[in-house]
Amino acid sequence: MARNTLSRALHDLGLSAWFGGTLANAVALNAAASEAGKDTGRVANEGWNRWTPVNAAAIGAHLVGSVGQLIGNRGRVANQEGVAAMSTLKTLLTAAALGVTAYSRSLGQVVNSQDNPSSRSGTKPTKRTKAEIAAAQEQLDALQWVIPALTGALVWVSSYAGEQQRASEVIKGTARR
């Protein structure tokens, strides 16, 4: 079996940053911004704006690594029972995570359109928050947990994929085909 260290590292590091960063921001940044008083909206916007380019690089690394892993394992995908189904599941989860991330970013841009929107936290509007921004914040309040859930599922499926690469699993999986 060939080594695909670079693509595996890009896949894993990108995915771990995507998962960990969005989870940390949902758990810590949005809540901590509420401590900024009247600057809550500005602090939350600034934090997410600083995270966005790092997140984009992480997602890019993950995607490049994923393609490299798929190319490097194309023989197993074609010949080992269960690998094509796992690859399809990973692709669907990745597409869902990308879609939710892109939609969340577009909502974030709505919130960011006002420098310091009235806010109780990064995703909790006040009664004074403009309707359009409040609607975006309310959607973000739910979606901030969807991205870590989807990327966490990707981590789990990737762990399963690693188990499928054990020599004993490759032998069993190819013999069944």
Image (cartoon, rainbow, N blue to C red):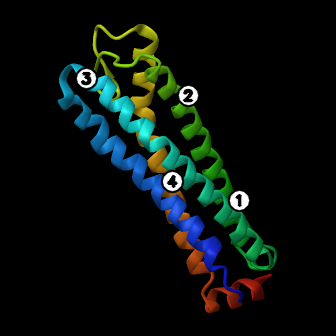
Quadrant in the picture for residue 90: bottom right
Q: Name the residue under label 3.
A: 39
| Residue identifier under label 2 | 106
- Can you tell which quarter of the image residue 45 is in? top left
Of circles 1 and 4, the one toward us is 4
Q: Quadrant of the N terminus?
A: bottom right
- Residue under pointer 1: 88
Q: Which mark is residue 17?
A: none
The residue beneath circle 4 is: 151
Q: Which of 127 and 61 is in front in this view?
A: 61
> How packed is label 3: few (under 14 Cα within 10 Å), some, or many (20 or more)?
some
Mark toward the start of the polypeptide (2 vs 1): 1
Q: Which residue: 33% across, 31% down?
A: 44
Q: Residue at x 81, y 74 (%)?
A: 78
Label 2 sits on a secondary structure element that is helix
Which mark is in front, 4 or 3? 3
Q: In this view, does 174 lie to the left or right of 65?
A: right
Upstream in sequence: badge 3 or badge 1: 3
Judged from the image, the secondary structure of the residue bearing numbered disc 4 is helix
